[in-house]
Image (cartoon, rainbow, N blue to C red):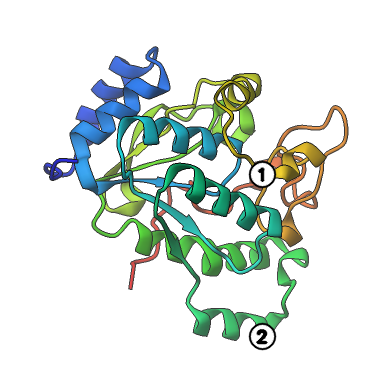
Amino acid sequence: MKSAAASPTQEQLQVDNTRFLSQPPQAVLKWALDEFGSAVTLACSFGAEDVVLVDMLSKLHSSPRIFCLDTGRLHSETYEVMDAIRDRYGVTIEAYFPQHDAVEKMVRAKGANLFYHSIENRKECCGVRKVEPLGRALAGMKAWITGLRSAQAVTRSATPMIEWDGAHGGIAKINPLINWSESDVWEYIKTNKVPYNKLHDQGFPSIGCAPCTRAIKPGEDVRAGRWWWESPEHKECGLHSHANAPTAK
């Protein structure tokens, strides 16, 4: 990868979004690698979309930058696919963990399962375990890649393929699969024999922390198993919020 240029402007990214909107994901990934070099990284939670992007990136570059947010409450199946991805592609996964002092303070004050009691508590937990570590993961980056798809949730329906992320210092946020359907994702996984989280075979289309994820019932929305006790408009953890993110330490 080349050294990254200056941070992108919002206007330029709007032009880039228009240019790549009808292009395949591999084209926007190649552009991202060429444009941002070692200062672009993939946020990988090891769900179906993310393992597709790992496969695509690995075919474009021998050592793409990939990070994960290990909240300390992940499913064992998630760690299994993490190891399978390492073995298959020979990539390094940069793991970021929550600050242990913040976790201890939160759990002592509100309990280990505070998120079930209120939206505020759930967002606090996500803030400690996900949002703050994300800020550290993106420090020094010019761009990050996500597995967002517009069909996943009402909160993502208007998400562009390439956008300006003011919440993390004005960097590019690249969503190569934004126009893909769920069937597109699974066709790619099967065709390319990509390792995937076995919870998908047990009715989990969306996988997060173990206490906050369940299998869905036939006919339910694909995000119905995430924070199922909340209404759909609240079902984001803060990673994809346009609000200001906490400063990385």
Tell me where residue 161 sits by quadrant.
Answer: top left
> Where 209 falls versus 161 (above or below)?
below
Secondary structure state at the residue bearing disc 1? loop
* Apparent side of residue 210 relative to residue 237 in the rendered image (left or right): right
* Apparent side of residue 22 relative to residue 35 in the rendered image (left or right): right
Image coordinates for residue 76, horizontal then vertical, percent? 70, 59
Q: Earlier in the sequence, mark 2 or mark 1?
A: 2
Question: Which kind of residue does numbered mark 2 sit on?
Answer: Ala
Label 1 neighbour load within 10 Å: few <14, some 14-19, many 20+: many
Label 2 neighbour load within 10 Å: few <14, some 14-19, many 20+: few
* Apparent side of residue 13 relative to residue 153 in the rendered image (left or right): left
Tell me where residue 119 sits by quadrant.
Answer: bottom right
Residue under the image location 66 percent in, 87 percent down: 108
* Apparent side of residue 20 relative to residue 232 in the rendered image (left or right): left
Image coordinates for residue 229, horizontal then vertical, percent? 80, 52
Question: Which kind of residue does numbered mark 1 sit on?
Answer: Asn
Specify the quadrant that holds the N terminus: top left
Image coordinates for residue 127, horizontal then vertical, percent? 53, 65
Disc 2 to disc 1, how far (Cα)?
Answer: 33 Å
Residue under the image location 31 percent in, 40 percent down: 62
Is label 2 in contact with label 1 (beta carbons under 8 Å)?
A: no
Which residue is denoted by mark 2 in the rendering?
A: 109
Q: Indicate which label's residue lies in the foreground, 2 or 1.
A: 1
Which residue is denoted by mark 1 in the rendering?
A: 197
Residue under the image location 74 percent in, 45 percent down: 199
> Where 55 falls versus 84 (above or below)?
above
Image coordinates for residue 19, horizontal then vertical, percent? 28, 16
Residue under the image location 50 percent in, 27 percent down: 158
Front-lying residue, 55 or 68: 55
